[in-house]
Image (cartoon, grey):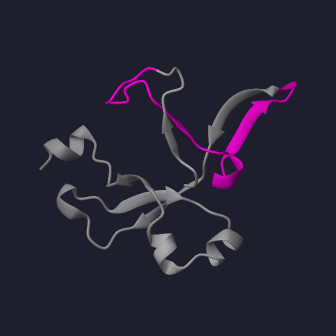
Amino acid sequence: MKYKILTNLLGFKNSRMENGNIIIPIADNNLYVHTLPEHPETVLSVTSSLVAWEMKDGGKYGNTHLLKQDLPKEQRDMMTPEQIQHLPVFGRMRPFKTRHEETAR
């Protein structure tokens, strides 16, 4: 993501930044703003599209995929393979097991 700023908007000094904020510009980071149709100034949420990429090695936790932001094709085509690889990871995934599946083993 571009232009991440870690700050404390209230001005309190806190070395652990428990009350800190991250400011992420919406347009620069392909985020979507959802508003009320009858009141477009009322923001309901800000979201991003994510895509799950298969991992070759799941590591010690058995993860099979990682979640990264889904960028428009035009933007992705302008990036180098290194830039694409170094996009931030939003999370990892592994197959979901129900309690029944876990106790059956």
Residue at position x 22%, y 41% in the image: 100
Q: Decide which of 104, 7 is in the foreground and name it.
A: 7
Classify 33 as above or below 94.
above
Q: Is residue 20 magenta?
A: yes
Which residue is most to the right? Answer: 38
Furthest-left residue in view?
105
Q: Residue at x 48, y 63 (%)?
A: 87
Closer-to-camera residue (9/76) = 9
Q: Would you say 105 lies left or right of 27 here?
A: left
Counting from the top left corner in percent of width and height, residue 76 is at: 62, 72
**Quarter occupied by residue 85:** bottom left
Q: Is residue 59 above or below residue 12?
A: below
Q: Which residues lie in the magenta part?
A: 12-40
Q: Position of residue 28 (x, y in %)?
A: 67, 54
Give yes or no for residue 29 being in the magenta stretch: yes
Locate residue 15, reporting x and y percent.
32, 30
Answer above or below: position of 72 versus 97.
Answer: below
Query: From the viewer's perspective, is 41 left or right of 2?
Result: right
Residue shown at the point (62%, 42%) measured from the top left: 47
Q: Quadrant of residue 1?
A: bottom right
